[in-house]
Amino acid sequence: MTEAELLRQLTQSVNELLGGDYRVRQKSFPDHLEDKAHEPELRRLHQSIHSLLEKFQAADTFILNLSKGNLDAEAPKSNQLISPFKELQSNLRHLVWQTHRIADGDYSQRIDFLGEFSTSYNNLISSLREKQALEKELASSEEKYRMLAQNVSDVIWKVDLNSGKYSYVSPSIFKLHGYTVAEALQFDFSYLFTTDSRLSFNEDLRHKILAFEAGDESARSFTVEMQQVSKDKTVIWVESVVNLLQNQEGKVTEILGVTRNIEKRKEAEQELKNTARELKELNATKDKFFSIIAHDLRNPFNALLNLTQFLIEYIETDNKERAIEMAGLLKDSSLSTYNLLQNLLEWSMIQQGGVHCNPAYEMLLPLVEEELEPLENMARQKKIELEIDIANTLVIKADKNMLKTILRNLISNALKYTYEGGNIMVRGEKKDNDVLISIRDSGTGMNPDEIKRLFRLNTEKSKPGTRQEKGSGLGLILCREFVTLHGGKVWVESEPGKGSTFFVSLPL
C-alpha cells in the first residue's frame, strides 16, 4: 500500500466519523508501505484516528443508554467527549431523586439546572404544594364538619324532592327522634310529621318554591315550626330552617335544613301565656272587686238607709200597714245585701287560696229546704211558686257550706229573672255515679250570647231582673268555682222567653 492510499483511508474514516457514523472501524496499519520515509508520522496519525474512533464509539454507546433512560450506565473513563453528558447524567439522577421525594409529599424541592424546564418544574411543585395545603385545609374542614354533624343536637339533613327521601341526615337524629341514620334514610321525609304539620309544611314549601323560581330571592330560606313524631310515638315541637337548592336549570330539586327541638321554648311560651292569662284574670278580679265595692255593695246600703228613713216616718205617722210593708222590703234588701257580702267574702277566700273542699255525705232535701226558707218572702212578693222534687232519702256527697252557697245563688238567680206568677222547680236525682240537681224557672230565658257570658269574670254588669233587680254576676262565678272543687260540672239550658234550667252534677 502506498502512502497516498493510507492517507485516503484515514481521510475516509474521519469523513465517515464527521458524517455521524460513530461505528466506523479503523483498518489495521499496513505491514509494508512502499515509501518508508514517513512511516512513524503516519503510524502516530493512524493510532490517533483509531483512538478517536474508539472514544466516539464509547461515547455513542453511553449517550444511547442515557437517551433510553438508563441513568445507571457506566461512563467511559478518560473520554472528554462525554463530559457534558456525565454532568447531565448526574443532574438527571438528582432529578429522579427529587421526583421521588416530591412523590412522597416533600414539596420543598427545587431545581435550577435545566433552564426553562426548571422553571416549569418548580411551578409544578408550587402548584402541588398549594394543592397539598388546600387538601389539608379541606380535610380539616371536613373533619370539623363531620364532628359538628355527629355531635350537635340539631339535625342536619338534605332531601331529594323527587323521591321525598333523605339523601343525607346527621347522626343527631337519634338524639332527637330515636332513629338511626340507616333507619331514617329508608322512610320519606314527611314520615316524621304529624298529619296537620305535614299538610301545613307541604303547602308552605309549595308556595316558597313557586315564589323562588319566579325570582323572589327572599323565598330561598324560611323557618317553620311543626310537630314531629319520635320513634317512641311521643310528639314534640321542632323548628326547621329550610333552604331551597337549585339544579343547573334553576329548578328546585332538593331542600337542605337544620331541625332542632323547641319543646322547652314552647313550654316557656305556654308558661308566659298562662302567666298573661292569670294576670288578666287577676286584673279582672281586681276590677270586679272594686266594681262590687263601688256599686253593687254601696247601692244596697243606700237603699237600706232610704227604707229605714221611710220606716221611721211611717211609724211616726202611725201608718202601720206601710210600716209593715217597708219592714218587709227592708228585710229583703238586707238579705240581698247579706248574700252579696257572703259571696264577696267567699270569693275573696278563694282568691287567697283559703277555701278547702271537705266533702261528706249529706241529705239533699233538708239543705234545699234550708236555703229556700229565707227566700220565701221574695217569692211571695213576686207571686212565684217554689216547688221541690227531691226524694227524702237522696244522699249527696259535698262540702255542706259550699253546696248551700251553690243552692242559694242558683235559686236567688232564678227568683230574680222569673216573672210574677211564675214558678221555680228544684229537682234532685241520682244519675249513675252522680247526683244531678236542676233548678228550672219560667223566667226571661237567655240567648246563646248571654249563655256564653255566664260563669265568667268580667267587668260587665249582669242584666237586671224582672223587677230591675241588680246583680254582680259573682254568685254564678262562685257556683262554678265550688262545683269545680268538687270535681263536678255546672251548665245551663235556656231559650229567650222560655225560662232557664241550671244543672249541677256532683260525683258520689
Image (spheres, rainbow, N blue to C red):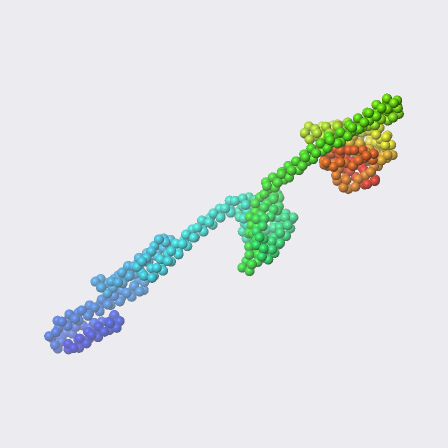
- Quick one: quadrant of the N terminus? bottom left
Quadrant of res 175: top right
The answer to whether 436 appears left or right of 20 in the picture is right
Quadrant of res 63: bottom left
Residue 501's x, y, as percent?
80, 37
Residue 247's x, y, as percent?
54, 58
Residue 203's x, y, as percent?
63, 52
- Residues 131 and 475: in front is 475
- Residues 241 and 139: in front is 241
The answer to whether 436 appears left or right of 58 in the picture is right
Q: Is residue 477 above or below residue 250?
A: above
Residue 161's x, y, as percent?
58, 55
**What residue sits 77% from the left and 34% below the top?**
504
- Quick one: quadrant of the C terminus? top right
**What residue sits 71% from the left and 32% below the top?**
290
Q: Is residue 370 above or below residue 141?
A: above
For residue 59, say whether it is visible.
yes
The answer to whether 487 appears left or right of 201 in the picture is right
The answer to whether 64 appears left or right of 406 in the picture is left
Residue pushed farthest left?
37
**What residue sits 60% from the left and 39% below the top?**
268
Quadrant of res 273: top right
**What residue sits 33% from the left and 62% below the top?**
116
For residue 371, say whether it is visible.
no
